[in-house]
Image: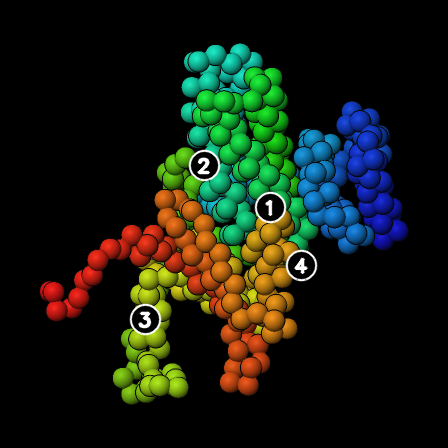
């Protein structure tokens, strides 16, 4: 039996490699239909993972991601496995699938009818349509930060890496379309139409892959607790265009037992003073910046939870390796920073960006013990725009 499974895997990889080498999609579909007829999500996942393990660059697998969806669409035999959870009102899986329906509606109603003739009216309608489509960022961010960690904890890493990379390419494509539509000196109309149609096609291919590959995989892999964490983190990240009308609560909130007054709470000792745990937690959540700590092995161990967060930090990322918290396109930068901290060549790295009307200062610090041993990396993120705009003086004695 194992020889048969391995043979199917090799045949699947052979088809994908032929596509990679230029085999037309129609021919690939014919070969697939003749050799297989149907394929399971597990086989697709294993095939992509195997290609990466064999040395195919993740970026190359990303390029083939849309092709995979087109070849396997309608031929996946275990789609029904996702049916149970996608039928539960308000369940994160159902929300993901319903949002895909909403995304498809935006494409069909607000974008596609205006693609073939670019006049003043169609440019306006396309600008509105792609602006609404850009809300797909929330849809992808929930997937990347709330669903992928559950897969990664169980050793499923190829699908998250490849899919996140393609998500980012789609985000960039939508951004480029909007930039062109708003420009007074936009590119040639034919080029713009090709860019928009390509973007629409990529979004549709991702819908296919999420519905037919990702959701069955999540259904088979994630635990009830994983789904609860995903549900709890969804509100902070947001949704595509609108919040679901139905909420999903699988567990009732249990009252916190009263603290035993006879039990002495241990203080946390510092070089200068001590704090009770609740004092320390409150202080860290009050400081006017976000902090995230990554341990020496590269796993997210802690982050503050202040009222005004700059970047999404759902609890699902706790325990996640830092490399899996970033899209594949930027992992090499993260690696370089962490390695420079580990080998002692650097103690700090700074970045600053314009982000959602904020000027965000992002600082990374190497955390070391008194002997200089590397303990981990601290990320500190702060909106410094209000500080940069300060003028004159304000003293305590002026009050």
- Check disc 1 and report its element: helix, strand or loop: helix
248 or 145: nearer the viewer: 145
Q: Residues within 10 Å of mark 2 (few under 14, many from 20)?
A: some
The residue indicated by pointer 4 is 155
Query: Which label's residue is closer to the chain start, 4 or 2?
Result: 2
Q: Position of residue 299 (x, y in %)?
A: 57, 66
Give the percent coordinates (x, y) of residue 183: 47, 25
Q: Quadrant of the C terminus?
A: bottom left
**Residue 57 placed where, x, y %?**
74, 48
Q: Which mark is residue 283?
A: 3
> Is 305 left or right of 196, judged from the image as shown?
left
What residue is shown with label 1? 164
Q: Which residue is mark 2?
A: 135
Residue located 56% across and 33% down the image: 173
Mark closest to the chain's N terminus, 4 or 3: 4
Dot 4 alpha-carbon crowd within 10 angstroms: few under 14, some 14 to 19, many 20 or more = few
What residue occupies the far front of the structure in this picture?
Answer: 392
Element on which disc 3 rests = helix
* Mark pair 1, 3: CA separation: 34 Å
Q: Mark 2 vs mark 1: which is more N-terminal?
A: 2
Report how many numbered discs are placed on residues in the image: 4
390 vs 372, left or right, is left
For the residues labelled 4 and 3, the Cα–Cα distance comes to: 36 Å
Q: What's the colour scheme?
A: rainbow
- SS class, disc 2: loop
Q: CA distance from mark 2 to mark 1?
A: 16 Å
Mark 4 or 3, closer to the camera = 3
Task: Decide: is 360 above or below 61.
Answer: below
């Amino acid at each position: 039996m194992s020889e048969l499974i391995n043979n199917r895997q090799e045949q699947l990889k052979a088809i994908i490699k032929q596509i990679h080498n230029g085999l037309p999609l129609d021919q690939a579909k014919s070969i697939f239909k003749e050799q297989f007829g149907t394929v399971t999500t597990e086989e697709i996942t294993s095939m992509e993972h195997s290609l990466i393990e064999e040395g195919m660059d993740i970026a190359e697998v990303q390029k083939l991601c849309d092709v995979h969806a087109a070849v396997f669409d309608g031929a996946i035999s275990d789609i029904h496995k996702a049916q149970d959870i996608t039928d539960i009102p308000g369940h994160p899986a159902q929300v993901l699938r319903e949002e895909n329906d909403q995304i498809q509606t935006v494409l069909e109603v607000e974008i596609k009818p205006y693609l073939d003739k670019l006049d003043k009216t169609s440019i306006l309608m396309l600008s509105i349509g792609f602006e609404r489509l850009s809300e797909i960022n929330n849809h992808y961010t929930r997937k990347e930060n709330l669903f992928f960690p559950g897969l990664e904890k169980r050793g499923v890493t190829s699908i998250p890496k490849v899919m996140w990379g393609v998500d980012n390419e789609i985000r960039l494509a939508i951004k480029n379309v909007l930039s062109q539509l708003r420009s007074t000196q936009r590119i040639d109309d034919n080029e713009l139409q090709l860019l928009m149609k390509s973007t629409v096609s990529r979004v549709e291919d991702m819908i296919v892959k999420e519905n037919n590959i990702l959701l069955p995989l999540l259904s088979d892999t994630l635990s009830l607790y994983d789904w609860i964490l995903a549900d709890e983190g969804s509100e902070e990240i947001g949704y595509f265009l609108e919040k679901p009308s139905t909420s999903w609560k699988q567990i009732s909130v249990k009252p916190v037992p009263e603290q035993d007054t006879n039990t002495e709470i241990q203080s946390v000792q510092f070089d200068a003073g001590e704090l009770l745990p609740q004092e320390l937690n409150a202080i860290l959540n009050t400081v006017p910046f976000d902090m995230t700590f990554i341990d020496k092995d590269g796993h997210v161990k802690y982050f503050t939870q202040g009222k005004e967060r700059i970047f999404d930090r759902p609890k699902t990322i706790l325990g996640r390796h830092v490399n899996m918290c970033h899209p594949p396109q930027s992992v090499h930068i993260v690696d370089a920073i962490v390695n420079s901290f580990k080998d002692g060549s650097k103690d700090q790295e700074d970045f600053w960006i314009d982000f959602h009307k904020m000027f965000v200062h992002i600082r990374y610090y190497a955390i070391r013990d008194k002997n200089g041993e590397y303990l981990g990396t601290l990320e500190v993120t702060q909106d410094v725009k209000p500080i940069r705009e300060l003028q004159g003086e304000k003293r305590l004695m002026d009050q």
